[in-house]
Image: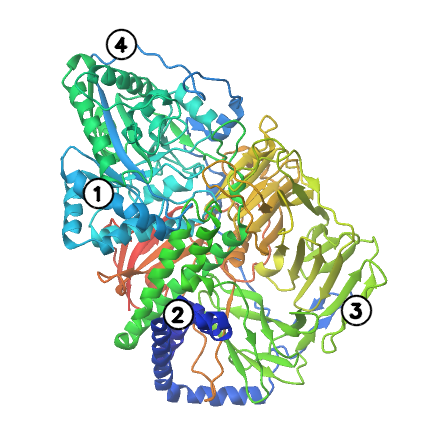
Amino acid sequence: MKLRKQVTVCGGAIFCVAVFSLYLMLDRVQHDPARRQSSGNFPRSQISVLQNRIEQLEQLLEENHQIISHIKDSVMELTDTGAVSPSGHLPFRSANGSWVLPFDGRPTFLAVKPQDCQFAVGNRGQADVQMLDVYSLLKFDNPDGGVWKQGFDITYEPDEWDNEPLQVFVVPHSHNDPGWVKTFDKYFTDQTQHILNNMVVKLAEDPRRKFIWSEISFFSKWWETADIHKQEAVRKLILGGQLEIVTGGWVMTDEANVHYFAMIDQLIEGHQWLERNLGITPRSGWAVDPFGHSATMPYLLKRANLTSMLIQRVHYSIKKHFASTRSLEFMWRQAWDTGANTDIFCHMMPFYSYDVPHTCGPDPKICCQFDFKRLPGGRINCPWKVPPKTVVEANIAERAHLLLDQYRKKSKLYRSKVLLVPLGDDFRYDKALEWDQQYINYQKLFDYMNTHPEMHVQAQFGTLTDYFNAVYKAHSIPQGSRPPEYPVLSGDFFAYADREDHYWTGYFTSRPFYKSLDRVIESHLRGAEILYSLAVANARHAGMEGRYPVSDYALLVDARRSVGLFQHHDAITGTAKENVVIDYVFGIPWVLYSLPQRTLIELDPAGPRYVVLFNPVEQERLCAVTVLVNTVRVRILTEDGQTVPVQLSAQWSSASQMSAEATFMARLPPLGLAVFHLYDSPDSPMTLRSDTLLRLPGRSVTARAGDPLPVRSQQADAQTFYISSQSLTLGFSGTTGLLESIKRKDDPREVKVQMQFMVYGTRPSKDKSGAYLFLPDGKAKPYNQKEPPVVRVVEGPLFSEVVAHYQHFQQTIRIHNVPGVDGLSVEITTMVDIRDQTNKELAMRLVTDIQSGDVFYTDLNGFQMQPRRHYLKLPLQANFYPMPSQAYIQDSHHRLTLHTAQSLGVSSLESGQLEVIMDRRLMQDDNRGLGQGLKDNKKTANRFRLLLERRSTGNKMTDSGTTSFPSILSHMTDAVLNHEVLALPVLPKRRGIPPLQTFAPLKSLLPCDFHLLNMRSIQSQDPHSPSPYTALILHRLGLDCGLEVQNLGFNCTTTQGQLNVSGLFKNLDLQLLQPMSLTLMHSSTPLANDSTISLDPMEISAFKLKLR
């Protein structure tokens, strides 16, 4: 019986999470008259599907109604007794003014094994090339290099290839952006479908022709419309080695702003599609267009069993340096790797662009003559004023020798006598004519070269893997191995500059509203995936498979693909046209309704309302949760009838409309659901009102005093004022209302942490900042406004906050009076609105007395930390880096970490400073092809957590290295910020208590250095229904134990990377445990079901489970 109840709860939960958005959609459709008239936007069929779903759920609930009736009775008994907290006493203020709460103060323990601390301080595998050293070494000057403007003159001896001829692989490709200046669908209709249709015909005409493709989002759309003959032709081309799918992700992902959850998810989505429809596994990575490259990507490709990879957009000075040392091909190793386990062979393209003029050799004027799409009479020509010529008998010798000279010069930059020559550009090969122009003319050139032995060259069309295999063969080594003498590199390739001082660091912040939305939706998707997998498994266990609505799986697939599409390097980057951005978000019905917003819960004296809280984090969570209610007469009870402390504060929707925010303490099971009961109750001694004080600049302003929640006001003075919790005391400037200092209760020293807001302009000259580029007009100037701000100070038993209202932003700084993770950091929400500005960028700067020098740390993709240095030899804009999840500065006493809920650009321009670009409004294009400025700004809430940690003595030596790791508290802070508790109000029903109870899926604790990245139901052959298998993806975190740990509020133990999966889930039997490659394409031998799996620090591993 109990099982059936759990299935219902779980079924209801996935319903809530995955269809949560659809409820809201119905709501919107009913209330928006414009929407109602144009019902075309929202097909009736979807509404009927939803109604069916609700009916199915109703049935399930009805069946369980009898089973739960006794729970109803017991709950009613409990509520009638008016039970209060276990200790029986109420919240009270102590003599020093701080609040004492009647928590279930369960003791918690922290047991991190010393061995689990060794990783952060241990030895690393030495890399020959460390990118931090390259930065120190280079001048970053820009002398004229001749025909290769950003390089140097390349010479060779004519007899160099006499003993070993040059092998040339020309690789035709077409770069298809899933949305940029046109929407995804428009590109598909106008170009992509024609490229793929022509490919099928044209490759079949000659078996020597080759082609590569990477974006599965486009390929899958084409495949669905292709007839059976085309599909067969494609399989044949792939089998025959003429067509290669490279990387095979849903998109060619951005590498700066994306979170590793989404990087992996879009790669799995692409690879699963390929496996199901084509039965192929990609071997080589191809990333020609992301604007800078992250070290996370080679790790993920390696874990997905790819053997080689290619990158292109790297700073021109670094390309030149690598070319001069013949280091353009290297083994890319993770900085934290203790051996060579993470090495992957990487090829860096040497020149300015991936287009034809910059790929055959150093001289674009010559290479352009071999882009046969530019033959006279076409729509595009060569800017260097020398057009291509059709290859004929009369000119073939001269043409072949001219091209070979470029090939030889390019090959001098590499260590082998095998050469890669990409042949393509954006949306190329969309017309049959172009296929003929390129393939026929090149084949003539190859035939000539190959039949003239004195030229010592073997030239042909090839795929990317053909090239890499030839390199491995030339060195007589297995695929993916390190060729003798090739360098090992560690580090990353940010920031990118393509010419002069044009650094692509603006896109780290461009369109922050969408960067923020992306992360909210990712968290919702992960939550829905996990609950769905558990719901289906519980249904199987209870023998209720047939009654569970597996059709919901189609919603999950849509969600995965929508999130995957947005990871494209013109989407999350904020570098697409305005209408395309709207299409990404609003073209997908469910996304619109995941917009973060709280539902008003209308309480009624007639009976309780229920709210289900979902904790998406894999550890128990003690936290403050806020819901919106329509009355201040509120009492909140746990499922077993315990009254919890509540803090009420006002929520003003307009000058006269007020609802109340009820903040209450909740202890939530890991990855679980808990039910709370909300009553309209006049007498609630556990419900306390916030004390609100308005600090007003002048006497003339009067405060709005709402009767139920009174507000006091006073004239502001310059004195510092403070708010406190059991863990922290914060000081604020009396003048600005902004943060000035942080003092931890266990630390005698008050640390200066001064909040400032700064403004950047853009250059007056021809080149100005735009969506991609940050070209400031010098150092930032302080933000100022004529009137002093209105500052609101709210204090109470569960939280205290200070809100400073400025013209272009409103900053809320809140601390929670809660034991554990939630109470140890400062919550910062900055609502930014710069829609009335022109060519301005707003920055938030933290000025501290931490002696950090010129070193700071930023994360790569939320996966790993990368040390950075501020260089005066570089322009200001070059010192900015992406910050997807955190940045910190430190000295021997403290570390100050800024955790972020959205990706933004960050720097440390002076010792002790951290600075984040919050939003940018730019009126012009920056000449990178977009053709628009950034003028579609929205009011955006940027959310952060500020964590001050004390460093224990004795870890002064570890800072010089190339690696750094967050503490366990920092990892947990990141988790609670990125995975907020989801409050799902249960719709009011007439029939009494809904059959809901706490759902705690874990039987045993997950070690606290394990992050459950995803539990993803694997698709069956039918893409819209799940198979019986689930992918469990785990990441073992790297820990820095050199920071003093306080009470985390949950039991935290580590196990040296050991985990028993069969003992993890409650009420479920494990029937298969099989280690897989990261994207589930390659499997190892299944393990015994009771096996203990083992992960090294930083390792991400995937397992195929069968749970029932």
Rendered location of residue 384, percent (x, y)? 39, 22
1025 to 154, vertically: above or below: below
Q: How busy is the neighbourhood of tag 2: few (under 14 within 10 Å), some, or many (20 plus)?
A: many
Q: Along the horizontal axis of the image, is 737 left or right of 646?
A: right
Whether residue 405 is visible to the viewer of this picture, yes or no, is yes
Label 1 vs label 3, nearer the camera: 1
Label 1 vs label 2, nearer the camera: 1
Report which residue position mark 2 lands on.
14
The residue sitting at 36% across, 54% down in the picture is 1033
Report which residue position mark 1 lands on.
198
**Which label's residue is closer to the chain start, 4 or 1?**
4
520 to 679, vertically: above or below: above
In the picture, the disc for residue 712 is 3
Badge 1 marks a residue whose secondary structure is helix
Rendered location of residue 701, percent (x, y)? 81, 64
Badge 4 marks a residue whose secondary structure is loop
Q: CA distance from mark 4 to mark 1?
A: 40 Å
Label 4 vs label 3, nearer the camera: 4
527 to 51, vertically: above or below: above
Report which residue position mark 4 lands on.
158
Whether residue 249 is visible to the viewer of this picture, yes or no, is no
Q: Along the horizontal axis of the image, is 894 left or right of 389?
A: right
